Image: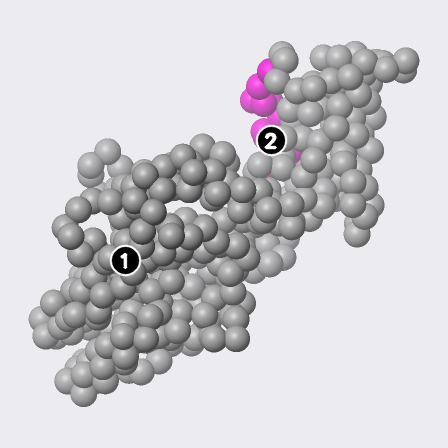
Amino acid sequence: MEVLRPQLIKIGGRIYRKNPIQEQTYQHEEEDEDFYQGFMECAEEPCDAYEVVQTQQGFRCTVKAPTLLYKHIVGKRGDTRKKLEVETKTSISIPKPGQEGEIVITGQHRSGVISARTRIDVLLLTFRRKQPFTHFLAFFLNEVEVQERFLKFQEEVLEKCSMDHGVDSTIFQNPKKLHLTIGMLVLLSEQEIQQTCEMLQQCKEEFIDKISGGKPLEVEMAGIEYMNDDPGMVDVLYAKVHMKDGSNRLQELVDRVLERFQASGLIVKEWNSVKLHATVMNTLFRKDPNAEGRYNLYTADGKYIFKERESFDGRNILKLFENFYFGTLKLNSIHISQRFTVDSFGNYASCGQVDFS
């Protein structure tokens, strides 16, 4: 059961267990009305945070957002928009489904327009966070040598540990998809993908080139570790990744990229540091080879998925392969990878990248 192996969270130097809650399937549209009632009472209204234009009829402000989120501003039967308009004494124009364009807020009073804009921003942010992740920032770790060594690791594990509970070929990573994740993204439009590309380029110019020296980072992928605190009930086993020269440059680089994307709002702040790891075994693969760990909890239409998983006994694997050497790599690119989509080589499809050299 999931309650016996909860997710571990590090806060202020301490590690806590996050007890899971089995949520029910729902559609966001059905909860918009109740949600609106709760958050409007505490929404703060900035004075001069938005560009409000004075017109002959009063005041006007526009909101740019992915069209996928507009339905949450409309609400079920249009109730959310109506309440916004009544309470802020404004008129709110929202493009119809399938149409591009901005949300336009107009009203007789500047304060009312600002109030409506603030509340719309809160709604957009809240429902954006309920969208499933679409992309992730990552290094690819699928060089030929590493793939071959990974297959050797899989072969030896199955040869020596296949009698251990839960250990079989279905829980191993696809060697073509080996990667090191920096952070997860929700990108809901081509414009947001372009914004992410630009942000990554800014990172390159401001600090990546300085840290990397304009050269690929030489790293080693060696040793294995498990995610939870019971080696007899493992869900995720990963290979450790570190700089070959023993420096902290890789950790510094990925942490600064994470910090920059968190500050921009493109990545929701969950961790202060990136855990350098490459997943090699994951029990979610047992039933779904395309599963992607804890990031696979919501479907595209917002439905919650409760995934029951059968753990494996990793004690012998950890003992026999504790220092297994997967190989040396030269990390030269950070990719914006698209989830559930592969390229012609079987790797995650890349929507953009920055190169170190």
Residue drawn at (45%, 32%) of the image: 263
Label 2 is placed on what type of residue?
Val
Q: Is residue 71 visible?
A: yes
- The residue at the point 52 percent across, 71 percent down is 343
- In the drawing, does residue 87 fall left or right of residue 169? right
Label 1 sits on residue:
277
User: Which residue, as the protein is rendered here, is positioned at the far left?
Assistant: 319
Q: Residue at x 27, y 64 (%)?
A: 329
250 and 292: which is toward the camera: 250
Residue 199 sits above or below residue 243 on the image:
above
- 194 within the magenta span: no
Element under disc 2: helix
Q: Where on the picture, by quarter, is residue 288? A: bottom left
Indicate whether residue 36 is drawn in magenta: yes
Indicate the amino acid at tag 1: His
CA neighbours of label 1 inside 10 A, class few (<14), some (14 to 19), many (20+): some
Residue most extreme to the bottom: 159
Residue nearer the viewer, 208 or 228: 208
Q: What is the C-alpha distance between the residues marked 2 and 1?
A: 34 Å
Residue to which mark 2 is pinned: 122
The residues colored magenta run 34-46
Q: Quadrant of the N terminus?
A: bottom left
